[in-house]
Amino acid sequence: MRTVIKSNRISKNYKGFQAVKDVSLNICEGEIYGFIGLNGSGKTTTIRMLLGMIKPTEGTCYIKGKKITSTNHRIWRSVGHIVETPPCYPELTVLENLTIFRRIRLISDPDIVPKVMEQLHLTRYAQKKAGTLSLGNAQRLGIAKALLHSPEILILDEPMNGLDPSGIVEIRKLLQDLAFNRGVTILMSSHLLSEVAKIATKIGIIHNGRLIQEIESIKLSDLLNQQLVIDTRNNQSAISQLTTAGYISKINNKGLIETTDRRAIQDPDKISRLLVYKGFPPTKLTVKEENLESHFLNIIERGGETLQ
Amino acid sequence: MKYFLATLHTEGLKIIKSKVIWIIAAAFSIAPLMAGFFMFVLKDPALAESAGLVGAQAQVAGEANWQSYLDLHAQMIGVGGIFVFGFVTSWIFGREYVDNTVKDLLTLPYSRAVIVTSKFLASFMTNIVLSAYIVALGFFIGWIVGLPQWSSAIVMQNLYVILIVTMLTIVLSTPVAFFASYSRGYLAPVGFVIITLIFSQILTAVGHGEYFPWAVPALYSGLTGETIISWSSLIIIGITSLLGFLSTLYWWLFADQH
């Protein structure tokens, strides 16, 4: 598939502080790329560089193969975006904000505004001043502006910010529809890791300005650690029986037996039979899978050493 | 051209739809009201005497006639315009940073120079309209007060002076746009305007006003009794205005926009 968003070893330095270091991204057409990282990890700086708002100290960014510079403005024809808080003119209504944006985007079809408002459930707020909108509705307005010109590429910094649970589901469905049915390429950063895990086709983890891991979502489950958690009436004796049988296990901080042995995870019945046979029948036997959040936190706790 | 017209149109919409411009117009209305009040006091010396301090200040305006009254308008635009037109310019540029909408403008599919130029033109037109409104309100108040010695020659001569003062004052607001963009808000540009006003007063008082661009419109308005402008003053104003425009353009085109 064609690469539509590309950064080639971009870095950004600010007076002795390196906000982004050697970040290379290759985002293909129709992909939803989830960009995750702690506050100050370099997500927004990278996004701003991709949008030509700030210049990389080193490296180059490309949109649809064209180099991003402050004078190469035609590339923004196909890009919609939200960076941090969604911008609006607070003293103008939702309708006026969108109308102004339609005009400066040179969109001739006036019907696009009501259509996008309908799509984002903003119709009943059309005459409301944008400055009085809730954070969630302001976010919807930001997304509406990003979608107004039917972009091929969406670059969204925290698009779910401030949305209620139903709003999150709604935006997730909308983004999935845009990517999977209309081929829109989406780069989104988010603190909601469970949402990123649900929506993204590829995930990039950025820490201390470095892109430390990229995960294809279809390979995510292979990468996430699994554990078999066992409870019996006598865990100390049970663990020695398991060790004798060759299963490396430990007692966790809750007093339960925990093993990451692949054979045990793949065949928990065998462990169950063994413990019953030895006289320690399990009262609990669960395969626990690490989620993106715990995986992310594990990487960060390990100091974010580079994993590709 | 279609990009320029589109951005100019939206700038116009943003200005008209905002409360700020109406508040500025209301605040600027104080100028002709004050001038009218001075004339009213001057027309009746007994009232001027009984008014005490107000009466003494009103004497500065000279006699109660159309010539003095229109002179006063030119002087108010020359001094007050530096602040009001500067504030309008700082608002037109600074609001994009305060409201965060600059991010939308930076990623439009045409040059940022189009946006900057249309903002300057919108600011220029707004300030012209504000000035015209002040003059129109001034004429109305002058008619209510019943000022004597109306003549079309006096009116034409004074309208010409007011127009020149307005233009000089407006073109001097381009550096304000740079400070609004550079500081991403209103505070620094308004501070800059206040400093230029203070320096205008000081340099005019010591006789060097003609070399300080922001003092020149007030000098031309007849604040010191003369309405002349030297070529050196015009060149200084031209260079200041051009520098303000180019630095703003450079900032929007090439500086990192956080």
Image (spheres, rainbow, N blue to C red):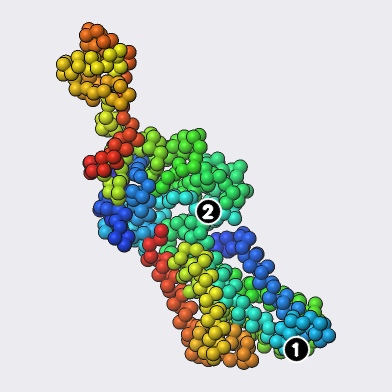
Indicate the amino acid at tag 2.
Cys
Residue A84 position in % (x across, y down): 44, 50
Q: Is residue B182 left or right of residue B29?
A: left
Q: In the rendered image, is residue A206 in sight?
A: yes
Q: Which residue is label 2 attached to?
A: A88
Question: Marks 1 and 2, how far apart in space?
Answer: 51 Å
Residue A215 x %, y %: 28, 38
Q: Is residue A302 left or right of residue A126?
A: left
Assign a secondary structure to mark 1: loop
Query: Which quarter of the image is occupied by the C terminus of chain A?
Result: top left
Q: Residue at x 51, y 83 (%)?
A: B213
Q: Residue at x 16, y 15 (%)?
A: A245
Q: In the image, B26: left or right of A173?
A: right
| Circle 1 chain | B
| Image position of B16 with respect to A205: above or below | below
Give the image location of residue B83, x and y in percent: 58, 74
For mark 1, what is the residue? Answer: B63
Q: Kindly identify the amino acid type of the residue bearing the numbered disc 1.
A: Glu
Judged left or right of residue A105, residue A193 is: left
Question: Visible in this render: residue B124?
Answer: no
Depth check: give the residue in front, A153 or B28. Answer: B28
Q: Residue at x 29, y 41 (%)?
A: A300
Kindly identify the residue that appears in the image at 50 percent across and 85 percent down. Answer: B212
Q: Secondary structure at mark 2?
A: loop
